[in-house]
Amino acid sequence: DCPGTGSGQAGRAVACQGCPNQRLCAAGAAAPDPAEAGELRERLRGVKHTVLVLSGKGGVGKSTFSALLARGLAADEAKQVALLDVDICGPSIPKMMGLEGEQVHQSGSGWSPVYVEENLGVMSVGFLLSSPDDAVIWRGPKKNGLIKQFLRDVDWGEIDYLIVDTPPGTSDEHLSLVQYLGAGHIDGAVIITTPQEVSLQDVRKEINFCRKVKLPIIGVVENMSGFVCPKCKNESQIFPPTTGGAEKMCQNLNVSLLGKVPLDPLIGKNCDIGQSFLSEAPESPATSSYRDIIQRIQEYCDQHHFQEEKSI
Amino acid sequence: LAGRSNLAGVQHVLLVLSGKGGVGKSTISTQLALALRHSGRKVGILDVDLCGPSIPRMFRVQDSDVHQCDSGWVPVFVDQDKSISLMSIGFLLEKPDDAVVWRGPKKNALIQQFVADVAWGDLDFLIVDTPPGTSDEHLSTVEALRPYKPLGAILVTTPQ
């Protein structure tokens, strides 16, 4: 019996031998089935704005940015914010939000997100591990299955902003997210980079990925953009932008540069201890950069909503 | 398997791993290769980061092409000395900014080819640079390399 083209067994089950579609299925059309995608979108009907945080490159500050974006948006108590961490191999969000050791609870209406504040809920595979050092060594199809569960089984409720933190790359997790959520239902992607060419070359691929799957790009954030010494106030380029940094790349590719955030050791420190850098270091130049960027993202989402309403 | 395996002339296989991205795996792989060359060794680097291949640019050979020979693919030599050779998906892309948007099974197929079909010749060390995570690429690489008894893995991190 055909396991279904969307199943993890697609192309690999005993019944697949001799099926004309076997090669295609086995080559990884282990992709979401459109009927399921429809069902998921129903489940997420209460979500007003969805923002994906992406980067081709690892270690540039996606999770850091996602956490601060969520906290920044949730500072307005009238807004309901949700942060979904789909980095299944390296989930950083629980630690950054001070939620390590928390467990996910089930209720009649689904899985309950873990709440940092009344208006800020978080979900991550990190909450499902029995120990924080457990390695999740899963191949693509199993990762897709969990992402689907997060979108289908978490009881998000009515949310103003759903922020989705992703792992580096352009693979299963990214494809599945866009396919399950539907590119047309995502307000856009915020793409994170650092100034050096080794990062930019991966980020250009990410920009091309977004264009390929018709995912709007809200803009690019350049992290680790210079360091001002707190003692002598001299500025250093720790990661020199040898090819013009994000600014040049954005000009060349016609995407918006949302802002540049300088290095501040307090950012990493607060992430490690699960506190909000924005609250703990309100005077840091990095804080005002983050706040400006968050505001631009909010403005983009408000405009997007307005345009959607107009078209209805 | 006809004839001699492409890895038969490789003395030691080393993997460079980290759970985390952006900690310097490719940088360390590159510097390690250069240091080994400096001490008179022949080194190859196999870059199995299919989404974000950094190795070609680190040796300034990002515009090189890969050619075929009887035993498979010829690795890209970094200079006339031929003491460092490389293989990466970066050499196979038509345009450097093309995104490789593949799901696991397709990535696995290429990694198996990379391990079996690159004609490395005689090497003192083959360094395998990996992407962040613990997923398809890592499982496939370890499975494909197992018969060649890798020396071990170097794990890279940053302090936080």
Image: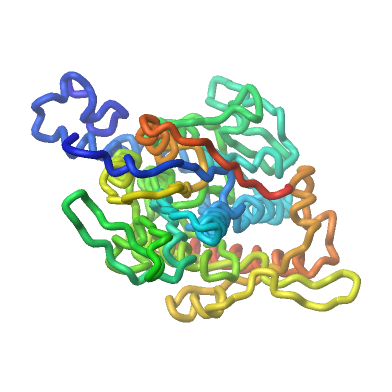
Q: Residue at x 69, y 43 (%)?
A: A119
Q: Is residue A305 visible?
A: yes
Tell whether A229 sits left or right of B47.
Answer: right
Screen quadrant of the N terminus of chain A: top left
Colour scheme of this structure image?
rainbow
Q: Which residue is drawn at 70% across and 56% down?
A: A72
Q: Where is residue A154 in the image (x, y as percent from the top left)?
A: 53, 32
A290 up-or-down from A255: above or below: above
Tell whether B156 sits left or right of A110.
Answer: right
A135 up-or-down from A34: above or below: above
Q: Can residue A51 be seen in this view?
A: no
- Which residue in the rendered view is the most extreme toward the front? B40
Foreground pick, B131 / B124: B124
**Number of marks drawn:** 0
Q: Residue at x 58, y 21 (%)?
A: A107
Q: Which residue is drawn at 38% across and 31% down?
A: B143
Quadrant in the rendering for residue A141: top left
Foreground pick, A131 / A30: A131
Tell whether A64 sits left or right of B145.
Answer: right
Q: Where is residue B66 in the image (x, y as percent from the top left)?
A: 27, 62
A13 up-or-down from B2: above or below: above
Foreground pick, B123 / A143: B123
Screen quadrant of the C terminus of chain A: bottom left
